[in-house]
Image: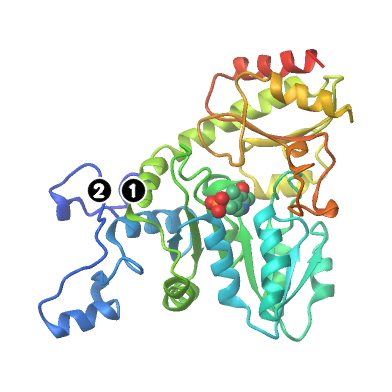
Amino acid sequence: MTKDIINQLGENREDYFNAAIPPIFSNSNFLFSKVDDMRSAMIGKNNIPFYTRGNNPTTKILEQKIAALEKTENAIALSSGMAAISTAILSQVKSGEHMISVNQPYTGTDKFLKEIIPNYGIEVSFVSGEDPLNFSKKIKKNTKIIYLESPNSWTYDMQDLEEISNIAKKNNLITIIDNSYASPINCNPSNWGIDIIIHSATKYIGGHANAMGGIICGSNEIINEIYNSEFKLFGGVLSPFNSWLFINGLRTLKIRMNYISESTPKIVSSLEKNKKIKNIIYPHSKNFNQKKLVKKYLKRPCGQFSIVLNTNDDKKIEGFCNNLNHFKMAASWGGHDSLIFPEIARYNLNSKYYSKTELLPKNYIRFYIGLEDTDLLTKDILDSLDKI
Ligand SMILES: *Cc1c(COP(=O)(O)O)cnc(C)c1O
């Protein structure tokens, strides 16, 4: 019998009284009465769990489901998207080696690559991702990784995954992608040969803004290698409770993504001719400049877009954000709530938090469309635009 990934895969209900929902195995230890049994568990024989920093039955269900959704052999769950990103990168590149990253990945990733990675004697080259040849040009003898995020955060720049993965394979490099924007529903980078796929599960996978987590997907070979070293030894494992919340979140992932894929383009199109907006950046809007890549790599529209307001006046920009009623401001996205992240909030922080080159212009505002009524959200934006 083929199992439904979201509702059945990984769930051995007969092992827990046929409960409809898997239990939370919140224990750290698993107990053994015989040395030989303990020894077998230590090497992962017959999937008998040994210790929760490594193998937890609740977390295992989540991992199996996400690996299947991403069409990879295996997956491991970590305590945040950043834990997944840092663990995956440090598993594939060592001191004295070199990696290539697409320009402007997610802010945390960007900072990790610029501020942490060089301290370990690893060199990073950043390239503009629209031309795959930009990656080939930077390949050196000691290059190990090509790091991608497509679409990226804020400006949704895309990369040609197939072309770049072909270049990587010819040069024996590992490709890593942050696939959080698309979710496993709207893009499966493994279809094009990408080796390691990462999600901030905090976003769409959880879907309810109630848990943080991250996922690394890949082949058995890659995942087992990470599992036995960086995963267990950096130790950023996901708590079983969060695994359980993510399993719950996953039940509605497709439905949520389908809803968002219809509501977001509607909202975007009702803003497209507004004079208060200079530009809307959204992969599924008419003027997006990488249409071919959108067609090839994104099955359906997703829930994030950015607007560039037609003003540079701080008061007007902040006024627009403050006057919204339904959209609240927040760092994250992917839950039921519609949110904005105004770039202007990153200005005037009175610290060295962001360098000038890391900031987008002040009039950029990132939108995330959640699960509320579409007309209500549209009206909220239009009303607030009218007031400035
Ligand atoms: C939020 C986010 C991350 C980081 O995930 P956390 O769970 O917050 O650590 C990484 N990449 C993208 C694209 C994100 O939006």
Relative to 344, say whether 124 is above or below: below
Instruction: Measuring from the top left, give residue 196's x and y in whole percent.
Output: 56, 66
Write down the residue under mark 2.
Answer: 22
Write down the residue under mark 1.
Answer: 244
Asked if disc 1 and disc 2 are in contact, CB closer than 8 Å, the reply is yes
How is the model colour-coded?
rainbow
- Report which quarter residue 266 is drawn in: top right
Residue ID at (73%, 58%): 160
Relative to 125, say whether 296 is above or below: above
Q: Secondary structure at mark 2?
A: loop
Residue ID at (30%, 48%): 8
Instruction: Measuring from the top left, give residue 292's x and y in whole percent.
Output: 77, 47
Q: Is residue 20 left or right of 281 when viewed as pictured?
A: left
Relative to 375, say whether 227 is above or below: below
Instruction: Measuring from the top left, give residue 283's x and y in whole percent.
Output: 73, 40
The kind of residue tagged 2 is Pro
Q: Is residue 94 left or right of 138 when viewed as pictured?
A: left
- Report which quarter residue 311 is drawn in: top right
- Look at the image and tell me whether residue 187 can be seen: no
Of circles 1 and 2, the one toward us is 1
Q: How many marks?
A: 2
> How much space separates mark 1 and mark 2, taking CA atoms?
8 Å
Label 2 neighbour load within 10 Å: few <14, some 14-19, many 20+: many
Quadrant into which the C terminus falls: top right
- Look at the image and tell me whether residue 293 can be seen: yes
Q: Secondary structure at mark 1?
A: helix
Mark closest to the chain's N terminus, 1 or 2: 2
The kind of residue tagged 1 is Trp
Q: Nearer the viewer, residue 335 or 329?
A: 329
Instruction: Measuring from the top left, give residue 182's x and y in whole percent.
Output: 60, 46
Q: Is residue 59 left or right of 264 when viewed as pictured?
A: left
Residue ID at (57%, 31%): 260
